[in-house]
Amino acid sequence: MTAESLLSEFAFPSARDAMGLDQAAQLVTAAYLLNKPRYFQLFTKRLVTDYAVDWTKEGPDGFSMDFPPEIPTKQATLMKTELERQSRHANDNLSGEIQGYSFGRCFKHVDNKCDDPRPKDLMIVRRIKENINVPGKQWPAHWCNRVTLRYILPRLYRLERVQRWLRCAHHREQTHDSVGPEQFTQLCERVDREVLRGLCLGCTRAGRVCECDAHSAPHAGALRFVEQDSLPYQLAR
């Protein structure tokens, strides 16, 4: 109960703004040593969402990191590998989906000629980036440009309708439609809930990639706990 009380103070969303990367890593270590699966899952997820970390880079700079020595080397290496995978997967999902908004269908589509090449809007990615005020000129193609997922996801989630102008090479004319807010919210919810799940404590302690059934206890309990920290849940409150 004492450990639960200590860690619960840092689970509130308001605590996130006060913590640097080193403090966040210490929280993960505390949850690991105290054997608290829910907090370990939550704090490892926050490491991915709240910080721009290069998990594969070695060296003591502000954008790479090592876990404290209390976590064994095998487990620390596994954690970094898995957090890197989640980070890459989340950003690749966002980048791929947003790049995909560039393509649409011609309103005069009557045969396959309009699909080769598909009508395309060359500027919609730029308009989306400008609407959510992403710093840096290369996002989303180069996501690791020190832009955190916690910065991107809420802005993309709240994004209103974005106009799309499609140039059909076959008909040699331009048509337009839009990408709606429902597409942005669905993308954010899918990435937040399905990709950014944090790490399973039991499997991490065993030195293996998590293969737990999402409905098995205590894994399901940890996931439900982490879901309360997810973007849709927090914005609905």
Image (cartoon, rainbow, N blue to C red):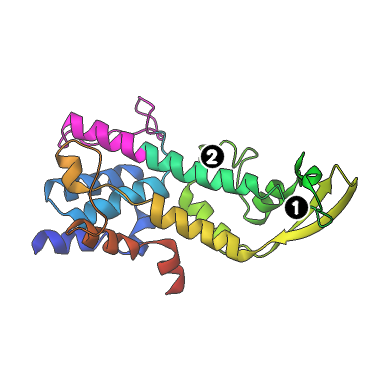
**x 17%, y 58%: residue:** 218
Residue 119 visible: no
Main secondary structure type of the part rendered in magenta: loop
Indicate the amino acid at tag 2: Trp
- Furthest-bottom residue in this view: 237
Q: Quadrant of the N terminus?
A: bottom left
SS class of the residue under badge 1?
loop
SS class of the residue under badge 2?
loop
- Furthest-front residue in this view: 111
- Furthest-right residue in this view: 172
84 to 17, vertically: above or below: above
Query: Was residue 142 drawn as part of the magenta stretch in this picture?
Result: no
Front-lying residue, 228 or 147 = 228
Front-lying residue, 27 or 78 = 78
Q: Quadrant of the C terminus?
A: bottom left
28 to 187, vertically: above or below: above
**x 54%, y 62%: residue:** 185
Residue 104 in percent (x, y) is at 72, 51
Front-lying residue, 62 or 106 = 106
**x 46%, y 46%: residue:** 90
Indicate the amino acid at tag 1: Arg
Residue 75 in percent (x, y) is at 20, 35
Highlighted magenta segment, given as a residue range: 55-83
Label placed on residue 143: 2
Which residue bears the numbered disc 1?
105
Query: Was residue 63 drawn as part of the magenta stretch in this picture?
Result: yes
